[in-house]
Amino acid sequence: MTRSTAHEKTNLLQTARTPKIAITVGDVAGIGPEISLRAVNELCDHSAADFVLYGPRTILTRIADVLGLNIPCEIQDIGNVSLNDFQPGQTNATTGLASYQAVEYAIGHALHGKIDAMVTGPIQKEAWHAAGVPFPGHTELLADRTGTDDFCMMLTSDEISCCLATIHIPLADVSSTLSSSLIVRAIRLSADALSRKLGRPATVTVCGLNPHAGENGQFSHGEEENIIHPAIQQARELGISVIGPIPPDTAFTPAQRKKTDAYVCMYHDQGLIPLKALSFDDAVNVTLGLPIIRTSVDHGTALDLAWQGTANHQSMISAINFALSTLRSAT
């Protein structure tokens, strides 16, 4: 499906009806079902939205019984997982396939206007791989199914926002994968998203890749000089306020955060370590550039906490509220 076709099929809130939010519950062997159920129980009575859970009905009913939770909304029964197929805290190909299928269905429903936004629970990437899923994670699947080439992963909270130039690749491959075009894309999409959120032009700080931002080539293979500096110059020519490249060890100090609306980070953990240190419980994962609205929790499946009734659902609440605020701003 081409990007233009996806845009044509996605007409958010063109009527006055109550918005419908899809929540894919993630891998049912983890905490996804619990945090999804807790979130809809908390929000259903006072949120101006209808919620739909996407996942195996049998498992959702069982965990609701175990934890004493209601199921106050519709369930899209997706994923053939029986109670005999798994143990809480232990993912496998069956649970991985079910979580993948839930996301596939939600994307299709979003593109056809059956839902207005989707919020995804945590998946186990090993379980996707075991099930033969050809995507490393949500972001790559969403981009493929919506026909989107111009996309980026951003983690955001009230404290900090980080957009990633590269996503789910080994650290050893970052240098060879980085390009000026990837960095410009991350700068442009994060600046646009934060400018809309803040109602003013956003300032983006770009991190260097190497210690001391390469120290003029002393601690690098020329990534700052040959890739990152040209990207920053291109972004400035687009009229974006950009700082950098800043050495990664000083980029996230309180003083620098005061100057920064969004960070562009060269690899996954460069952005997620400061974000989770500052905002683990309430940060939101957003895929920028898609023709549909998708948000997610900022954490994984927490298998050690599965089905125990102790999982913190605040990131799911934040992800749902972010999706709703994005819908409101689109009208």
Image (tube, rainbow, N blue to C red):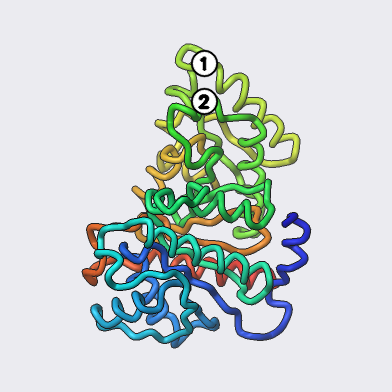
Quarter holding the N terminus is: bottom right
Please tell me how many numbered marks the rendered image carries.
Answer: 2
**Label 1 Cα crowd, 10 Å radius (few <14 / some 14-19 / many 20+):** few
Residue visible at 38% across and 56% down in the picture: 93
The residue carrying mark 1 is 221
Of the two numbered discs 2 and 1 in the rendering, the one whose residue sits closer to the viewer: 2
In the rendered structure, the answer to whether residue 100 lies left or right of residue 188 reads left
In this orientation, which residue lies closer to the viewer: 106 or 163?
106
Does residue 185 lie above or below 47 as drawn? above
Q: Do the residues labelled 2 and 1 touch (CB within 8 Å)?
A: yes
Secondary structure under the numbered disc 2 in the rendered image:
helix
Residue at 52% x, 13% y: name it: 217
Question: Which residue extends farthest top?
Answer: 218
Estimate the x, y position of residue 271 in percent, counting from the top left: 45, 42
Viewer-proximal residue, 262 or 28? 28
- Per the model, the C-alpha gap separating discs 2 and 1 is 9 Å
Q: Where is residue 39 in the image (x, y as percent from the top left)?
A: 39, 75
Inspect this view and state whether residue 194 appears.
no
Quadrant of the snapshot with the C terminus: bottom right
Q: Which of marks 2 and 1 is nearer the N terminus?
A: 2
Q: Residue at x 54, y 75 (%)?
A: 21
- Disc on res. 36: none
- Residue 175, numbered circle: 2
Amino acid tagged 1? His
Residue 2 placed where, x, y %?
Answer: 75, 55
At a point 44% along the width and 69% down the height, the residue shown is: 79
Asked if residue 167 is positioned above or below residue 83 in the image, the reply reads above
Image coordinates for residue 121, horizontal then vertical, percent: 43, 63
Q: Quadrant of residue 224?
A: top right
Vertical placement of 124 versus 248: above or below?
A: below
In the image, taking residue 331 as reference, residue 256 lies left or right, namely left
Q: What residue type is labelled 2?
A: Ser
